[in-house]
Image (tube, grey):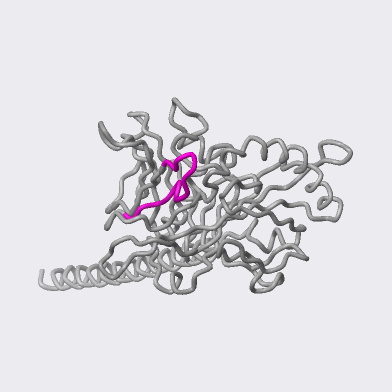
């Protein structure tokens, strides 16, 4: 996993940080979100935003949703719902196959939904997660470990405003133009009977990256959002993960607070809350208050290596699709030529038979 030069492997609160595999290694892009939210990679598949894939009923009823599709006509839908008369607002994540226009598909099934948990003022625990739709267990989540330190959050915000610009500037003048904020993703631990027990294990790291720009002589601040990615750090989880598991991980990058992904917000922002903040999680600033975030800075080379322009297997699938269309067209043309030749041969034979019959008739007259 690549990091800025000088960043060392670190361990805090039992959290595995980037840098363990060397700064020159390309990171795992288990989930990657680029082009303002237009391209999404989840596991081995890469999807493209498809406005025409949104269910027509959702549009008519004003129900926010967004759809991503890959060339094989399978897709992902993330839709906002209030969960019935007594349910809490959340996003439902579904997979679809045989996709057509206006949300028509051969098959659609829910694979999970978001859960926005409330963590008490002095408590610790998960504050946002993606549930599995089958067993209803919390599969993956973000945690807040601040506890009573949350009382000092306003003071830390003041210190952040004083120090952040200087730290960004010192890296910018060294050519490290991208600021990356990392945060761990956890999974609860269950016993053999499926009962949740005390503890958690880290399964990955979520990272969002901004390019910086100077705002004064000695200060620089994040200027433009580049992309967000998830790297799985637990090899056992990776080995046992299904496509649905990676799509659920993708739910984290889709359901961040609005502002970073303009294309996503155009489809997912409920009318009462354009920023979607009530139902999502906020991408951190790096100055965490118990969110276990940390910051790295990267130059252009490492920023590109970290997935800013990576489109996964999309190009390969498009090429295969074009070749497939070409082969099918050629096959149809060959079939057409054969049928035409056969038709011409048949017509010729019939004409010859008719001529022969006519000649035979003349001879008998």
Which residue is at the front of the view, 119 or 317? 119
Q: Residue at x 40, y 45 (%)?
A: 78
Q: Which residue is painted at 55% across and 46% down in the image?
A: 37
Residue at the image point whose x is 46% and y is 36% from the top: 267
Q: Residue 97, can we see it?
A: no
The residue most toward the left is 364
61 in the magenta segment = no
Residue 294, quarter of the rendered image: bottom right
Q: Which residue is at 57% across, 67% downward?
A: 28
Q: Position of residue 18 (x, y in %)?
A: 63, 65
Indicate left or right for 309 with 84 as reference.
right
Seen as rendered, the residue at the extreme right is 217
Give the magenta-colored segment's residue range. Answer: 118-132
- Find residue 8 and report its horizontal and vertical position in percent: 71, 68
Q: Nearer the viewer, residue 222 or 187?
A: 187
Between 180 and 9, which is closer to the camera in this rendering? 9
145 lies left or right of 84: right
């Amino acid at each position: 996993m690549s990091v800025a030069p000088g960043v060392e492997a670190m361990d805090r609160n039992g959290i595995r940080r980037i840098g363990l595999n060397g700064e020159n290694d390309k990171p795992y892009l288990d989930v990657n979100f680029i082009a303002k939210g237009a391209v999404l990679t989840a596991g081995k598949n890469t999807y493209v935003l498809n406005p025409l894939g949104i269910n027509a009923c959702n549009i008519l009823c004003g129900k926010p949703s967004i759809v991503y599709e890959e060339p094989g006509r399978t897709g992902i839908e993330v839709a906002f719902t209030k969960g019935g008369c007594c349910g809490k607002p959340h996003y439902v994540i579904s997979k679809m196959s045989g996709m057509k226009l206006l949300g028509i598909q051969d098959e659609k099934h829910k694979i999970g939904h978001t859960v926005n948990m409330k963590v008490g003022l002095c408590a610790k625990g998960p504050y946002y997660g993606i549930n599995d739709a089958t067993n209803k267990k919390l599969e993956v989540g973000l945690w807040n470990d601040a506890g009573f330190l949350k009382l000092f959050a306003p003071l830390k915000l003041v210190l952040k405003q004083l120090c952040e610009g200087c730290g960004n500037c010192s890296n910018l003048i060294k050519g490290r133009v991208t600021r990356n904020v990392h945060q761990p993703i956890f999974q609860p631990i269950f016993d053999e009977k499926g009962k949740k027990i005390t503890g958690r294990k880290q399964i990955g790291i979520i990272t969002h990256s901004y390019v910086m720009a100077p705002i004064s002589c000695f200060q620089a601040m994040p200027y433009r959002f580049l992309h967000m990615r998830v790297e799985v750090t637990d090899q056992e989880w990776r080995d046992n993960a299904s496509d649905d598991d990676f799509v659920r991980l993708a739910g984290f990058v889709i359901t961040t607070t609005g502002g970073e992904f303009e294309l996503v917000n155009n489809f997912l922002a409920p009318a009462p809350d354009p920023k979607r903040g009530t139902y999502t999680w906020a991408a951190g600033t790096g100055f965490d208050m118990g969110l276990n975030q940390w910051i790295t800075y990267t130059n252009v080379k490492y920023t590109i290596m970290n997935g800013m322009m990576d489109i996964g297997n999309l190009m390969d699938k498009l090429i295969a699709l074009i070749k497939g269309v070409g082969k099918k067209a050629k096959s149809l043309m060959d079939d057409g030529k054969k049928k035409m030749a056969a038709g011409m041969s048949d017509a010729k034979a019939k004409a010859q038979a008719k001529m022969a019959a006519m000649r035979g008739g003349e001879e008998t007259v």
